[in-house]
Image (tube, rainbow, N blue to C red):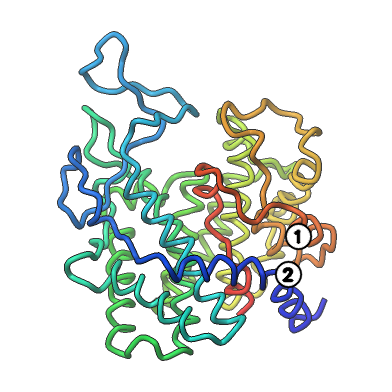
Amino acid sequence: MAEASMLNDIAAIERDRVVHAADRFLREAPITISAYPAKRSAGGVHDYFSEADYWWPDPADPHGPYIRRDGMTNPENFVAHRQALIRLGVQMPALTAAWLLTGNQQYAQHASEHLRAWFLDSSTRMNPNLRYAQAIHGRRTGRRYGIIDTIHLVEVARAIGVLRKTFVLSAIEHEALRAWFATYLRWMIRSRHGLQEYNAPDNHGTCWVMQAAQFAVYTGNHQLASHCVERYKRFLVPSQIAPDGSLPLELQRTKPYCYCLFNLDALATLCQILATVHHGLWSFELSDGRGLHKAMEFMYPYIADKAKWAYPADVQYFDHFPVRQSCLLFAGLAYAKPNYLALWRELNPDSTVDEVVRNTPIRQPLLWME
């Protein structure tokens, strides 16, 4: 399918959904983490804070350090900052996509208000680090796993690039936004948490590279973008994809279906981000054939018909997946797979289940066709 034709097709598919959502978001003011004080945080009002999902009070010591129950989310943990960040990741890109579809400056202007609140306004902005993310009560004030929370800034950064065409932000504001992401990127690269997450062999390592790639492309860090290409080829594919195309590290988890989908989305988004840096990344494979193409072939039958899933069901939210996975769109285009694209179109693009929204950070395909 020709690129221009595909762009027109996606615009037609997306128009009603995106404009309807954007009209609703026009009525909602930006809300940042500063609106939600975190009493258990070791940081301040501008420091992002979250608590690890799978950690619970110890029945043998209710007031002591929490204990782990993998795959079981503790609903009492602090998630307000994460929810605010996800809200930004839902609303700001949708408003930008609505501007692309309609040319209505109202959408672009409101998208810019979110950016000013989150990254520019000294009274409401978020500090560009995640020192206090994924804390564990009684054990850790923050952990490297928290860096995965900012996957919801990937599409925001993509949308900022699109907004440059609208002139709703001044050159000074654009430079300040670029500086925020450049500072956060330096923290990802140099901090202890960042280095630990960089070396993670599973979906956490994928999400580190996916974020670093998009933030590097956005800020013009060409050296880091090229490094992300090599990281994909020399670390992510060898450590994660088995000869049969499966993702063994994700299959070992208590939510294997969700984690496989999540990691495939991140791998495919990474390839999409780096397409302008390395045109052959989509076709890259190891000498034994391992690569994203084989991983998609492994997982596609289970996305098309979950009843065929040959592994344990997820302990939570199994019935809510799959949704409109970005890997189907990006890989469908890259590998000329009409069946992938048809399935992508059939699946739910707007789940209202928090866990699903959290695990599907790419929601505006028009931004990725630019």
Give the vertical position of 53 relative to 205 (above or below). Answer: above
- Apparent side of residue 234 relative to residue 337 in the rendered image (left or right): left
Depth check, front residue: 30 or 85: 30
Q: Position of residue 77 (x, y in %)?
A: 33, 34
Depth check, front residue: 43 or 123: 123
Name the image quarter holding the N terminus: bottom right
Q: Position of residue 66 (x, y in %)?
A: 29, 23
Spatial separation of the CA atoms under disc 1 and disc 2: 8 Å
Numbered disc total: 2
- The quadrant where residue 250 appears: top right
The residue to which callout 2 is attached is 13
Name the image quarter holding the C terminus: bottom right
Residue at 73% in and 68% down = 334
Give the vertical position of 240 relative to 336 (above or below). Answer: above
Depth check, front residue: 211 or 316: 316
Give the vertical position of 24 relative to 132 (above or below). Answer: below
Residue kind at label 1, given as amino acid type: Arg
Q: Nearer the viewer, mark 1 or mark 2?
A: 2
First-in-chain label (1 vs 2)? 2
- Apparent side of residue 39 relative to residue 312 in the rendered image (left or right): left
Q: Secondary structure at mark 2?
A: helix
Decide: few, some or many residues near mark 2? Use Cα within 10 Å; few <14, some 14-19, many ≥20: few
Question: Which label is found at residue 41?
Answer: none
Contact? badges 1 and 2 (CB < 8 Å): yes
- The quadrant where residue 245 appears: top right
Residue at 70% in and 50% down = 290
Asked whether residue 161 is in view, the answer is yes
The residue to which callout 1 is attached is 345
Asked whether residue 227 is in view, the answer is no
- The quadrant where residue 6 appears: bottom right
Residue kind at label 2, given as amino acid type: Ile
